Image (cartoon, helix red, strand yellow):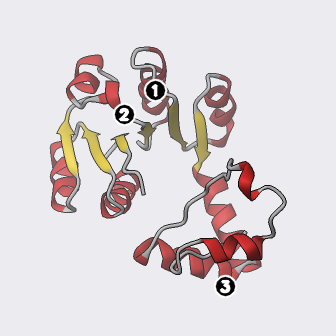
Amino acid sequence: NMSLRINIVGGGVVGRYLAVRLTERGDDIRVIEQDERQARAVEESGARVVVGDGTDVETLEAAGTAGVDVFVAATGDDDTNLLAAQLALSRFDIDRVIARVNRDENAGPFEELGIHAISTSEATARELDNRIERPSFTGFIEELSHSGDAQELELRNSEYDGRTIGELDDLLPEQCLIVM
């Protein structure tokens, strides 16, 4: 399991919750938060925090943004998220930039700029739908996120071409499980 370097702008409830999950998974997380009270709450939850403005180039540099694998703009303000995400793309050349979008009508402009937009209401609806449509699978994934890890991988070894899932399963370590 490869550890990722991830910067998160916004240490409110969403940013803090995400930071805790990713830190527990072993990723290298820095949360950039302007409000000192929120920043303390992030620190108390066990994640590293940089106090400053996530739309300020010097703050982003100080937080080591130049070397991150993923950049997340997770504040409750779409303008802040858009500006922070644009800086990550243009000034720091980050490939994977993800932003929380609080007002659905703003998702399009984010996507047009190459920022992966997560609409808060759409994500909530999708999660509710998963609980209705696939309760056991959703429960399995939820449990896995606390005790293990789900990985997506692509086999490119031509030695495996034409093999069945059953045959591949026999080649994997015992604690691995193919679910799709």
Q: For this view, does 55 lie left or right of residue 132?
A: left
Q: CA distance from mark 2 to mark 3?
A: 35 Å
The residue wearing badge 1 is: 94
Q: Position of residue 22 (x, y in %)?
A: 37, 57
Asked if the residue under mark 1 is in contact with the one under mark 2, i.e. CB atoms within 8 Å, the reply is yes
As drawn, is 177 to the left or to the right of 5?
right
* Residue in the image at 57% along x and 51% along y: 120
Asked whether, in this view, residue 89 is left or right of residue 153, the answer is: left
Quadrant including the C terminus? bottom right
Task: Give the camera-side residue of 68 and 102.
Answer: 68
Q: Mark 2 or 3 closer to N-term?
A: 2
Q: Is residue 9 visible?
A: no
- Which of discs 2 and 3 lies nearer the camera? The answer is 2
What amino acid type should be assigned to the residue bearing mark 3?
Ser
Q: What amino acid type is highlighted by mark number 2?
A: Val
Q: Which mark is residue 23?
A: none
Q: Which residue is mark 3?
A: 136
Task: Name the secondary structure under disc 3.
Answer: helix
Label pair 3/1, CB-CB below 8 angstroms: no
Q: Residue furthest top?
A: 91
User: Which is nearer the eye, 9 or 139?
Assistant: 139
Quarter of the figure with residue 19: bottom left
Note whether 166 is above or below 43 in the view shown: below
Q: Position of residue 34 (x, y in %)?
A: 23, 36
Instruction: State the mark number for residue 68.
Output: 2
Q: Secondary structure at mark 2?
A: loop
Task: Tell me, yes or no, if residue 76 can be seen here.
Answer: yes
